[in-house]
Amino acid sequence: MILSDNEILEEIKKRSILIEPFDKKCLGTNSYDVHLSKHLATYKDEILDAKKHNRIHHFEIPDEGSVLLPGKTYLGSTLEYTETHAHVPFLEGKSSIGRLGIDIHATAGKGDVGFCNHWTLEISVDQPVRVYHGMPIAQLIYFGVSGDVLTLYKNKKSAKYNERTPYPVESMMWKNTF
């Protein structure tokens, strides 16, 4: 079941959900709007290799915005830091963003119980579009979990995205054994 606005507020009071900064105006009927931080990144190499650490170039979105171009992967991050200790968070793009031809994730819309960090966004666009830091970019939806969780994401030895950072984080696929 998806948490309602009232249930999200109750879980925030219980500290099983943390959103920093929190603004009640961003609370929807059953979601919470998050915003694009000033941090973006692109990969340095033209050809990415799943078995190698693909380095990224970080840059900031200026006040006049940044134009994103098709055919390029941009990594962004949410302004908000979140913690989810008893629910499964899903990050979905806002319809207004989709209508501008912006995708905010290729495959990683689901978080894990115990995820504590800023969200990295895997941004791609259909045509050139200017984006601004602080603009609403996505919404968090929280699902209840059935049963006990054995290991929270933040406690997993295999978790690759636990280091707290406001910057977008590149793929850590190279840390897997295959």
Image: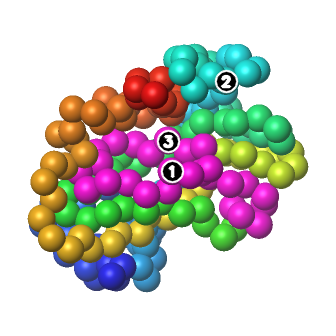
Query: What crowding class fits label 1: few (fewer than 14 Cα within 10 Å), some (14-19), or many (20 or more)?
Result: some
Mark 2 Cα shell of 10 Å, populated few (<14), some (14-19), many (≥20): few
Q: CA distance from mark 1 to mark 2?
A: 18 Å
- Figure check: 95 above or below 174: below
Which three-letter amino acid code belongs to the residue tagged 2? Leu
Mark 1 or mark 2: whose residue is earlier in sequence = 2
Q: What's the distance in space between the residues labelled 1 and 3, CA to CA?
A: 9 Å
User: Is any part of residue 99 visible from this angle?
Assistant: yes
Q: Quadrant of residue 94?
A: bottom right
Residue 164, x across and y down, in percent: 32, 32
Q: Earlier in the sequence, mark 3 or mark 2?
A: 2
Seen from the viewer's position, the closer of residues 58 and 112 is 112
Q: Which mark is residue 120?
A: 3
Circles 3 and 2 in contact, beta carbons < 8 Å:
no
**Residue 48 badge:** 2
Looking at the rendering, in which quadrant would you find the N terminus? bottom left
Q: CA distance from mark 3 to mark 2?
A: 18 Å
Residue at figure coordinates x 59%, y 56% from the top left: 137
33, above or below 35, in the image: below
Q: Nearer the viewer, residue 23 or 162?
A: 162
Q: Amino acid at mark 1?
A: Ala
Amino acid, disc 3: Thr
Q: What segment is highlighted magenta in the picture?
A: 97-122
Tell me which label, 1 or 3, sits earlier in the chain. Answer: 1
* 119, above or below 111, in the image: above
Q: Is residue 41 left or right of residue 46?
A: left
Answer whether residue 116 is magenta in the image: yes
Q: Are marks 1 and 3 in contact (CB under 8 Å)?
A: yes
**Disc 1 target residue:** 108
Give the residue displayed 20% in from the left and 57% down from the top: 85
